[in-house]
Amino acid sequence: MKRVIKSLGISLSTILLIVILFVIGLSVFVHNTLEKKTHKNSTYFESIKMFLTKNFDGKAERALKESRLKEKFHNITIYYPEDFSELIPITKETLKWAINKNKRVLGIVEATPVDLFVFKDKEEMNALSNLKEVSGFYSNFDKLLAINYDNKEAILERRETPLYFFQKFILHEYTHYVFSQMIAGSKAGVTAYPLWFNEGISEYIGNDKTIVEISNIKVVPFVQLIDGEQWQTARFQDGTNVYMQRYFAIKFLVDNYGKGILKEIINSTNSSGDFKGSL
């Protein structure tokens, strides 16, 4: 009996040692991979936390978090300047709208932690995104949504135009997060999807309950709106409005085939890796 107990103890100790070595090896691998990918230093604890939450906090993001107030809403942490406090109820109301609308159009996705940063200074937000002249952005690697707000008093008074833009930015960027969750770990990956489709869905949901009228715009061919570089080039061409153009492309699909068509296309592409064939 003593021999059995002794053998069992040795076996358990060996298994425990293997597990410990595996965890240490994994933490070193994750830490080195994150540092190499982000070109930023982080502690082993931070690296493991980022790996488990699938949420990377860069140096600039950590500095912003330390300088702001924060509020939790479902899986979303809102980081905001003190001046924004009065807008928190409308922000939560809009996030609830975004969550529910995405569920109806795209289905239920895993609600992993995501951060929402609000900026009064548009240039400060653009510096964080490395993009030009945007009113919001989403970073899947950082699990970070960001929006710009202006004219706080008009939003609080629920004046139509300022409130529309404020809520649209939240709806639009949160939809990017949901789309990224839908394709996470799929055979396709984000590169299988042309940017017009991704942006079009976000713009479609961003304009929920809004009547968008067609204006006289210069149409950019779909083949010129595949990747980010093409999209940015097209944005700044005279006479174009690529967001409106792709809104109507998605609206056409939904109006003719039902709101479930977007989920069908995404699920098919995720399985096959072929967006064009799925469409």
Image (tube, helix red, strand yellow):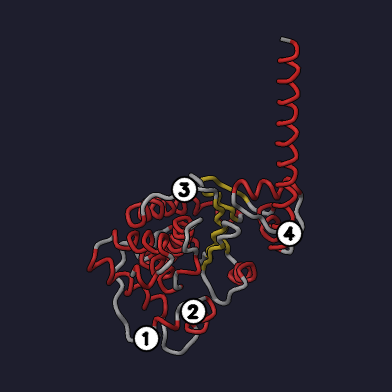
Q: Which disc, if any, is residue 136?
A: none
Say left or right for 41 vs 49: right
Mark 3 and mark 1 lie on one chain; the one further toward the N terminus is: 3
Residue on which the image places disc 1: 219
User: Which image quarter is the C terminus in?
Assistant: bottom left
Mark 2 and mark 1 lie on one chain; the one further toward the N terminus is: 1
Q: Tag 3's secondary structure?
A: loop
Camera-near label (1 vs 4) is 4
Tell me how far mark 3 sits from mark 4, CA to CA: 26 Å
Name the residue type under label 3: Glu
- Mark 2, residues whose alpha carbon is within 10 Å: few (<14), some, or many (≥20)? some
Mark 4 and mark 2 lie on one chain; the one further toward the N terminus is: 4
Outermost residue toward the bottom? 238
Tell me how far mark 2 sits from mark 3, CA to CA: 28 Å
Residue 203 location in percent, x, y?
39, 68
Depth check: give the residue in front, 268 or 134: 268
Asked if one can make out residue 154 in the rendered structure from this viewpoint, the answer is no
Tell me how far mark 1 sits from mark 4, CA to CA: 42 Å
Asked if one can make out residue 8 in the rendered structure from this viewpoint, the answer is yes
Say left or right for 41 vs 214: right
Looking at the image, do the residues carrying marks 3 and 1 touch, with CB atoms under 8 Å apart?
no
Tell me how far mark 2 sits from mark 1, CA to CA: 13 Å
Name the residue type under label 4: Glu
Name the residue type under label 2: Trp
User: Which image quarter is the N terminus in?
Assistant: top right
Looking at the image, do the residues carrying marks 1 and 4 touch, with CB atoms under 8 Å apart?
no
Residue on which the image places disc 3: 110
Residue on which the image places disc 4: 35
